[in-house]
Image (cartoon, rainbow, N blue to C red):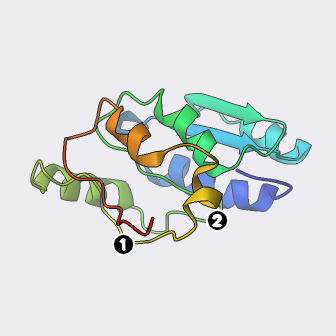
Amino acid sequence: MYGPYPGLARQAIEPIITKCDKQQYQLFVACNACCDETLEYVNSIDQIDRKFRSDLNINKCPMQRQMFDQVDTEFIWWFDDDSFIVDDDALSRRLAIADAAPLSTVLWGPIFYWNDQQGFNFGVDVVTWGRAQAWYSQEPIPCDVSGK
């Protein structure tokens, strides 16, 4: 979650806790410079397994790194605060896809490129960071020489 947008927080979190089987997931929620109303909402939800908070906006990637360091599950399903679940079977369908995928598959979703590495990574060498992670599979990091 980010900023003064409690409506987005509700829109992102409510479908997870109402449409997904809690026995199939852990819910981590991060708040980057969130308003009091968002913080009160997040703190009122018992289904959240782990909360991360920064009173200052440390930006998405540094907050993701803090969160991902605590993940001990096989899969991660990332939601920005403006994304949300629509279908009741969304989690079970995604888990079925993940379970059926070859072991070499590490990411599902559209291909997205970020051309401004300096603005994206906030001074952290993303390739070096990725290679240092326990989940790194020794596959080539998908960056080209231009930084894309």
Where residue 99 appears, as percent x and y from the top left, is: 16, 49
Which badge, 1 or 2, is on the more N-terminal residue?
2
Where residue 75 appears, as percent x and y from the top left, is: 32, 43
Q: Is residue 60 visible?
A: yes
Q: In the drawing, does residue 70 fall left or right of residue 134?
A: right
Figure label count: 2
Q: In the drawing, does residue 145 fall left or right of residue 120?
A: left
Q: Please give the residue where the numbered disc 1 appears in the rendered image.
A: 111
Identity of the residue furthest to the right in this view:
36
Task: Please say if 66 is above or below 38.
Answer: above
Which image quadrant is residue 137 in?
Answer: top left
What's the amino acid at mark 1?
Ile
Q: Please give the residue where the numbered disc 2 appears in the rendered image.
A: 82
Q: In the drawing, does residue 82 fall left or right of residue 6?
A: left
Q: Quadrant of the C terminus?
A: bottom left
Mark 1 touches mark 2? (CB < 8 Å): no
Where residue 109 appears, as percent x and y from the top left, is: 35, 67
What's the amino acid at mark 2?
Asp
Q: Secondary structure at mark 1?
A: loop
Q: Is residue 44 visible?
A: no
Spatial CA distance of label 1 from label 2 is 19 Å
Q: Which mark is residue 83?
A: none
Depth check: give the residue in front, 112 or 146: 146
**Residue drawn at (66%, 61%) of the image:** 11
Q: Residues within 10 Å of mark 2 (few under 14, many from 20)?
A: some
Depth check: give the residue in front, 120 or 30: 120
Q: In the drawing, does residue 106 fall left or right of residue 33?
A: left
